[in-house]
Image: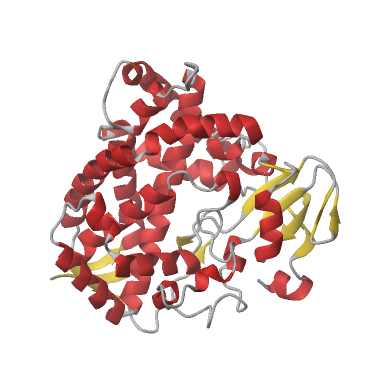
Amino acid sequence: MKRYETYGPVSWMKAFGVNIVAAAGGDATQVVLTNKDKTFSQQGWTYFIGPFFRRGLMLLDFEEHMFHRRLMQQAFTRPRITGYLEHVASVAAEGVKAWETGTFHVYPRMKQLTLDIAGAVFMASALGNEKDALNKAFVATVRAGTSMIRFAVPGGRWNAGLQGRKLLEDFFRRNVPAKRASDSNDLFSGLCHAQAEDGEAFSDDDVVNHMIFLMMAAHDTSTITTTAAAYYLGKHPEWQDRVRAECAAAGPGPLDIDALEGLRDLELVIKESLRLVAPVPSLARKTVRETEILGHYVPANTMIALGPWVNQMLPEYWSNPAHFDPERFSEERREDKAHRYAWMPFGGGAHKCIGMHFGMLEVKTLLHEMLTRYKWSVPQDYKVRWDSTALPAPSDGLPVSLQPL
């Protein structure tokens, strides 16, 4: 934010040993994400996470990306999502009801729970004894992207990320044959059976690469969003009471897709939490030819860093932007409509998150379970500190006082 205030929407900076153009604000963001002449490629991500999430959907470009996205969309139809939600509801209910009351650290327990959900939704199976190893592997691959030492030095984050990638690759690859032979209603099986009209399908390598990226993206972003919402509801008991009443009126779980979509007040809270704590606070691109951004010359092969979180805190779009105010998303106000890219927790353009609707429904399911079983609070003088080494996570795990209803 300070860079934007000092230098404006387009400026140069140096990070991780490379020169980068920082672009923020709605207009600069729109130039990059609209990408009318296909100048801005996903190669910007390759520098940071390419070795760990190679050929995941977010790292593909242009025609190849569109082909993979169209195939993958078959796994995110409404009937498919309806089936996934049955798994989400079952695992969420089982996990949340087992929580111990008293001082409770939300983030680590939520991360464990969302990984359990990902195992059920993506694989139609419990992850069993491999769950802890898989969780550590996902953490290592995400954290490796911001390593200053970008070599396989024993004990370093980069090396841990490479080892994590190998573990994940081995795990998914040995499960591919069974999923190709299965007709189960899970995402892994869906990717194995997805076909284009001409019969072209994902290779085994494609399936493995997409599963690694999708499971990381799904459980990390859901963890961050649910944790952030839990924090703000703990800080604002009037909103906690309001959304609890809405959840109680909807009935006990499991809620179907229509009932979840009807939780309007809860959606306001989630959207505001996503605004204040962007799960992916920056986006990377790289120019494939020389270009301009708002009149600023940018050479070919230049890294671009977009700042979604900056956009989501700009006073020209948001009234009192640092304040928790879910009503700003109400139909009467719709501050998010101030600019196409004022609110962009799911990215934008051709690479907008393919699972954003499912993700919103998963977070609603988790919060519905929490709100109908417990009440929680944090001290009024408590302010969470977000560790942004990789994706944002509360440094202290977000301790709350959790009490049964």
Going by the image, does 207 lie left or right of 286?
A: left
Quadrant housing residue 38: top right
264 to 35, vertically: above or below: below
Instruction: State the residue at coordinates (58%, 75%).
Output: 317
Q: Where is residue 327 in the image (x, y as percent from the top left)?
A: 40, 77
The residue at 66%/49% (across/down) is 284
**Which image quadrant is residue 6 in?**
bottom right
User: Quadrant where the C terminus lies?
Assistant: bottom left
The tally of labels here is 0
Looking at the image, can residue 16 be seen? no
Is residue 249 rendered to the left or right of residue 18?
Answer: left
**Can residue 89 be seen at all in this image of the molecule?**
yes
Q: Which of 196 and 48 is in front in this view?
A: 196
92 and 318: which one is in front? Answer: 318
193 in relation to 321, above or below? above
Question: At 25% across and 72% down in the image, what residue appears?
Answer: 376
Residue 320: image location, x then y, percent = 53, 83
Q: Which of 355 and 215 is in front in this view?
A: 355
Figure colour scheme: secondary structure
Q: Is 319 above or below relative to 365? A: below
Looking at the figure, which quarter contains the N terminus? bottom right
Residue 39 drawn at (x, y percent): 75, 43
Residue at image point 38% right, 20% down: 176
